Every structure is written in structure tokens, then in C-alpha cells.
Image (tube, rainbow, N blue to C red):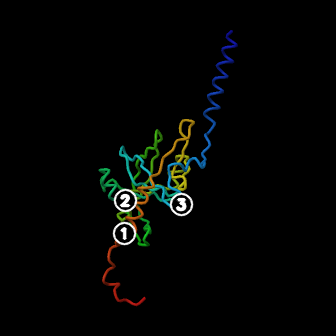
Amino acid sequence: MSVARLSVRDANQDLKRARMEISPVLSFLNEDKIGTIQPHDDALVVILRIGGYDVNKMMVDQGSGAKIMYLDLYKGLNLKLEDLTPYSSPLVSFDGKVVVPRGQIWLPMQTGLEVVEVDFIVVDAYLPYTAIVARPWLHTLGAVSSTLHQKVKYPSECQVKEILGNQSVARQCLVAATQHKPEAESSAHVGEDL
């Protein structure tokens, strides 16, 4: 009888190990487009949790390696500028201007039960998004994003979890970006021949 118990116990442990080793398949189907406006070219804009706060208007940019946080969000999270560590490499903004970062900071970003430390570069520049998360966050989470399906899928507890995008907010951000009036060029450039 003790031999039977051992083999049942061993079988249960093997089954548990097998479940832990099996990763769910991350894929997108046509059904994943239900609830989205099709066709579209919208950015993937989601709500994520940073430092205990739900943060709206976060763009998922799978084509970038830089995780950007705009100064307004940084201040809105009640973080202090003296907590930033130096970041010396300038960036180029979407409108082609060189932006000197204010610094960088590691912050916990929660997605469901998963918490990933993200090294944000903090910039003082205009963009209608509050932050941009990029490939390093996706890769650390083991996630796959799809702008077409307006979702991020990631494995958690042997299941596939989803983060839904918000097309309405993405479109509002696009309108805000196109209507934004950039700062006037300095008078030193006026009248110069190129």
C-alpha cells in the first residue's frame, strides 16, 4: 500500500511539474478583433499600474527600446526630481527635436499579478501620451502585443492574460498631437538662408 501511495504521489508531482513547464500559447485570432473598430491604424494605448497608481494613456511601442515617461506623469506620481539618476544621452522626439532627458528612474509596473521593474527615461517634452512602454517591458513580461487586435497578451499562472487597448483614447491622443502647436522657433532662425 505504501508503494501505491508513493507512485500516486510521484505521479501528482510529475503532473505539477509538467503544468509548470507548459507555457500557454500567445496568439491572436479574428475573434480577438471583436469590440474594435476595423479597419484602423490606431496606436495601442492601455492603462497600466505604476507605483500603485492606474496610469491612463500609456502607449505600447513594440518598435522602440526606450521606455519614456513624461514629466507631467512623473510629478503626478508624487515623485521627486532628486530621485532621478543621470541619463546623459539625448533623444529625438516625434517632432524631430532633440530632447535632453531629466534623468531616469526604476519603477515597479504591475500588470495583473505580474510586477516588472521598468527603467523609465523621464523627459520634459510634449506628447499626448503619459508614457511609452517598449520592447524591454514586453520581453520581460513575456508578452506579445498587437495593434490590429488592440491587445497585449502575456502568460500568467499557466493562463493567457490580456490587456485591452482603448481606441477612443488612442484617437484622442492622435488629434491632440496633430493640433499641438510647437513652440515658436527662436528669432535667431528667422530670416536665415538655409
Query: Comparing marks 3 and 1, which lies closer to the viewer?
Result: 1
Residue type at mark 1 is: Gln
Residue type at mark 3 is: Gly
Q: Which mark is residue 63?
A: 3
In the displayed structure, 176 sits above or below 149; it is below
Q: Which mark is residue 179?
A: 1
CA gap between label 3 and label 2 equals 19 Å
For label 2, the residue is: 70
Q: Hey, which residue is sitting farthest top in the picture? A: 1
Residue type at mark 2 is: Tyr
Q: Quadrant of the N terminus?
A: top right
Asked if residue 165 lies left or right of residue 192, the reply is: right
Q: Quadrant of the C terminus?
A: bottom left
Q: At numbered mark 1, what does the secondary structure look like: helix, strand or loop?
A: helix
Which quadrant of the figure has residue 100?
Answer: bottom left
User: In the image shown, does 162 or 92 lie closer to the viewer?
Assistant: 162
CA gap between label 3 and label 1 equals 24 Å
Asked if residue 193 lies left or right of residue 187, the reply is: right
